[in-house]
């Protein structure tokens, strides 16, 4: 009997909480009461829904489903995504992104300063517009300028820009959130969003500079960690974050099915194997309910059907462009003669019928410096620019003959390479094309810098732009007094090609708004003379805002994706299927 009572006494004592347990329970209750509830953050591009502050999946689903058109809401820190998706399976999807976290105690500052760029807050309308241009080029949602300016001194939300120290050009952007300031986060967290670098940027480590600035900014303000979300297959971004010390975090994000997110939830499609110049047209056609049939993905051939109208396309080249017009554009000698007859300004030219030294020398004496081109090549193949000696020209002729049996010599004109895009008798876009350049870091060889810049250009253009290490690249480097094994000083810029073609690493810089009316009119007259409904007319100009020009080429299959965010695909599909035009 005594033993039974003693055991019962032990059981009772075990059930009674200790003073420490009572204290911990009280602390948990206090934390639960102070934990912020149902937190949402207006980020400009959409609303960030802090899932861990919501008590139920239904409450998280509500702001997601109320997402307005043109925005991108994100439910972040979702612990049970399957429960949330079950609330609206037709409307919501699991974002295929990974979450990474950097604990501030694990962060190590960079040893060498990135001196070519500076990072600061976006403080003006110009900053905001430049920031949005980069976001649009990267396929991201722009942010209202007013919203950015309202937060230029905010301690809760900040928009940063990376600026080229020499030119003052905005080349990158990122957004940061201080969770403690936003919603009294007891964990004292922060997060990084919308990191983007201009596709044409020649600087290395811009993304790293932006990320480090944000880390150090929040670190000195007492934040314990920085979180971010990155698409699962973005290997280059993941490599950067791991380099900075970020680690995978086991949480999820959920988004609403909308046009912006379509590529994330529709799954692999046959048409997605086409290049960006075909894909931009296909995306616009599908958005209008136009049937798309991919005839040959490798050749970028597809057919569009709507209301009994059928148009076959090879990127922006369609049935509407006649074989005769194609011949005029593809043969540079015929292009020159056609435009000259139309009264337009063109360079002096010589068609090299044979390798007559006398003929070539006579032309060189007349014009001073020449451009050597294959007669019927494209994408910058076989072109050599600014040749002033007979030996250089003869070598370049042989180089061009590797692409085409006939070769054209043109008088060289100093100035900027301008592409004007004309669709259906309208100038839709204009951009200065700059040749491929590299920027020294004081460590890498010229060959290594070319490889790095080439990889950046590939990533920015879906693999369409690279810097070839060929005869022309080697000649330009040698002409500048360098070799492939030399090391450029930090911030030193070297132009490694003279041609500005995008396929050989060139970059585009929009000048549509400031284009001189004389040049715009010349582009329209050139397309009429050649008989092409869609064309990229290439000029050499001292300044796109001045009337002086010469037309050097015409492209009957211009890349529409190169001029985003201008509505190039929209105007193109308007022309093909005017009944689908959205007023």
Image (cartoon, rainbow, N blue to C red):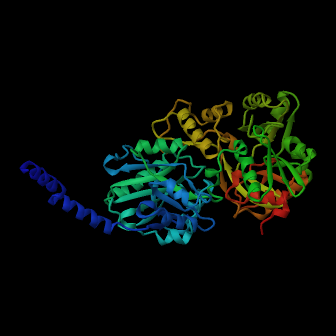
Coordinates of residue 445 in the picture (x, y in percent): 51, 33
Q: State left or right for residue 530 relative to residue 300.
A: right
Tell me which corner region of the image, top left, top right, bottom left or bottom right, holds residue 134: bottom right
The residue positioned 81% from the left and 38% from the top of the image is 409
Count all numbered tags in the image, as a single digit.
0
Tell me which corner region of the image, top left, top right, bottom left or bottom right, holds residue 495: top right
The residue nearer to you, when weighing 158 against 75, is 75
The residue nearer to you, when weighing 406 against 97, is 97
Q: Is residue 580 visible?
A: yes
Q: Is residue 397 above or below residue 532?
A: above
The residue positioned 64% from the left and 54% from the top of the image is 262
The residue positioned 48% from the left and 35% from the top of the image is 444
Q: State left or right for residue 186 relative to residue 244.
A: left
Coordinates of residue 473 in the picture (x, y in percent): 64, 34
Coordinates of residue 151 in the picture (x, y in percent): 46, 69
Q: Is residue 64 above or below residue 412?
A: below
The residue nearer to you, when weighing 315 against 511, is 315
- Which residue is most to the left? 2
The residue positioned 55% from the left and 43% from the top of the image is 233
Q: Is residue 422 above or below residue 583?
A: above
- Which residue is most to the front? 1
Coordinates of residue 196 in the picture (x, y in percent): 54, 53
The residue nearer to you, when weighing 305 against 548, is 305
Q: Quadrant of the C terminus?
A: bottom right
Tell me which corner region of the image, top left, top right, bottom left or bottom right, holds residue 410: top right
Q: State left or right for residue 546 relative to residue 153.
A: right
Q: Is residue 169 visible?
A: no
């Amino acid at each position: 009997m005594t033993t039974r009572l003693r055991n019962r006494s032990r059981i009772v004592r075990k059930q009674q909480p200790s003073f420490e347990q009572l204290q911990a329970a009280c602390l948990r209750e206090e934390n639960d009461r102070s934990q912020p509830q149902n937190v949402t953050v207006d980020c400009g591009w959409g609303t960030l829904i802090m899932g861990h502050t919501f008590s139920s999946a239904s409450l998280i689903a509500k702001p997601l489903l109320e997402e307005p058109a043109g925005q991108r809401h994100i439910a972040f820190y979702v612990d049970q995504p399957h429960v949330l998706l079950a609330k609206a399976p037709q409307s919501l999807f699991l974002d295929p992104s990974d979450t990474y976290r950097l604990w501030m105690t694990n962060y190590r500052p960079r040893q060498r300063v990135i001196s070519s760029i500076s990072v600061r807050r976006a403080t003006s309308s110009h900053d905001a517009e430049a920031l949005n241009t980069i976001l649009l080029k990267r396929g991201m949602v722009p942010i209202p300028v007013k919203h950015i300016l309202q937060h230029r001194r905010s301690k809760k939300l900040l928009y940063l820009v990376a600026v080229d120290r020499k030119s003052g050009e905005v080349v990158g952007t990122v957004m940061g959130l201080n969770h403690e300031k936003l919603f009294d986060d007891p964990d004292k967290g922060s997060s990084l969003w919308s990191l983007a670098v201009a596709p044409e940027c020649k600087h290395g480590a811009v993304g790293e500079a932006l990320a480090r600035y944000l880390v150090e900014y929040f670190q000195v303000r007492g934040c314990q960690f920085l979180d971010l979300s990155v698409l699962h297959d973005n290997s280059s971004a993941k490599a950067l974050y791991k380099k900075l010390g970020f680690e995978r975090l086991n949480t999820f994000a959920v988004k609403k099915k909308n046009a912006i997110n379509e590529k994330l939830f529709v799954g692999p499609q046959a048409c997605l194997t086409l290049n960006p110049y075909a894909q931009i047209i296909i995306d616009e056609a599908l958005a209008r309910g136009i049937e798309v049939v991919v005839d040959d993905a490798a050749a970028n051939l597809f057919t569009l059907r709507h209301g009994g109208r059928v148009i076959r396309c090879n990127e922006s080249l369609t049935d509407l462009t006649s074989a005769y017009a194609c011949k005029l554009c593809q043969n540079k000698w015929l292009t020159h003669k056609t435009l000259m007859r139309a009264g337009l300004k063109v360079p002096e030219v010589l068609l090299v019928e044979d390798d007559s030294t006398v003929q070539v020398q006579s032309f060189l004496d007349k014009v001073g410096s020449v451009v050597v081109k294959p007669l019927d090549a494209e994408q910058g193949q076989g072109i050599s620019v600014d040749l002033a000696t007979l030996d250089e020209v003869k070598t370049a002729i042989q180089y061009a003959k590797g692409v085409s049996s006939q070769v054209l010599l043109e008088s060289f004109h100093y100035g900027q390479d301008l592409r004007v895009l004309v669709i259906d008798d309208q100038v839709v876009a204009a951009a200065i094309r700059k040749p491929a350049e590299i920027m020294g870091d004081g460590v890498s060889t010229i060959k290594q810098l070319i490889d790095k810049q080439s990889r950046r250009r590939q990533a920015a253009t879906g693999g369409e732009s690279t810097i070839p290490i060929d005869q022309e690249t080697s000649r330009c480097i040698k002409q500048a007094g360098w070799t492939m094994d030399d090391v450029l000083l930090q911030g030193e810029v070297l132009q490694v090609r003279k041609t500005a073609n995008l396929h050989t690493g060139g970059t585009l810089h929009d000048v549509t708004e400031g284009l001189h009316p004389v040049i715009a009119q010349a582009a329209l007259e050139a397309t009429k003379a050649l008989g092409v409904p869609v064309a990229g007319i290439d000029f050499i100009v001292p300044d796109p805002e001045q009337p002086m020009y010469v037309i050097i080429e015409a492209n009957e299959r211009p890349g529409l994706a190169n001029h985003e965010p201008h509505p190039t695909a929209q105007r193109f599909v308007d022309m093909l299927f005017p009944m689908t035009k959205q007023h």
